[in-house]
Image: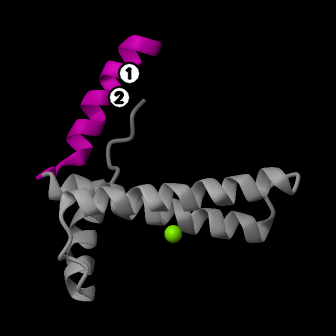
Amino acid sequence: MQPTNMELNELIQYIQKMKKHRGFDGTNIEQEMVLFTEEVGELAHEVWRGVKNGGITEENRRDLAYEVVDCLIFLLSIANMAGIDDIEKYMREKEAINTRRFD
Ligand SMILES: [Mg+2]
């Protein structure tokens, strides 16, 4: 049932190269964690904006998606900084554990 090709490892490699190209590769994992937390706050703001206005609008959905992307970038960057270059392997392992636990 699990997808066989998630391509998350390619995203990790892209993020690593993109950070270096843009000069954002000078952070350490602690700083990256703080930046990730900021992005989670921005995502929460967009979710709350949708809830507060009675539902997610098309504009709200785009802004919310941008914050999901920001979170994903920092999340995978943290994984990369921790030396995780095959997150897909861990995804399969953890989902196997979750499947045994919840299915
Ligand atoms: Mg953001």
Q: Which residue type does callout 1 highlight?
A: Asn
Q: Choose between 40 and 70: the one closer to the eye.
A: 40
Magenta span: predominant SS is helix
Relative side of 79 to 36, left or right: left
Q: Name which residue lies at 30% across and 64% down.
A: 11
Q: On the picture, is 1 further left or further right than 65? A: left
Q: Residue at x 27, y 87 (%)?
A: 22
| Callout 1 touching callout 2 (CB < 8 Å) | yes
Q: Residue at x 19, y 81 (%)?
A: 20
Comparing 48 with 1, the one in front is 48
Q: Which residue is mark 1?
A: 98
Q: In the image, what residue type sits under mark 2?
A: Glu
Instruction: Indicate the position of residue 26 as horizontal and vertical percent values.
Output: 17, 76
Q: Residue furthest bottom?
A: 22
For disc 2, the marked residue is: 95
Looking at the image, is 103 positioned above or below residue 16? above
Quarter of the image containing the N terminus? top left
> For the magenta stretch, what is the residue range?
83-103
Q: Horizontal and vertical percent for residue 56?
A: 78, 57
Horizontal and vertical percent for residue 14? 26, 72
> Is 87 one of the magenta-colored residues?
yes
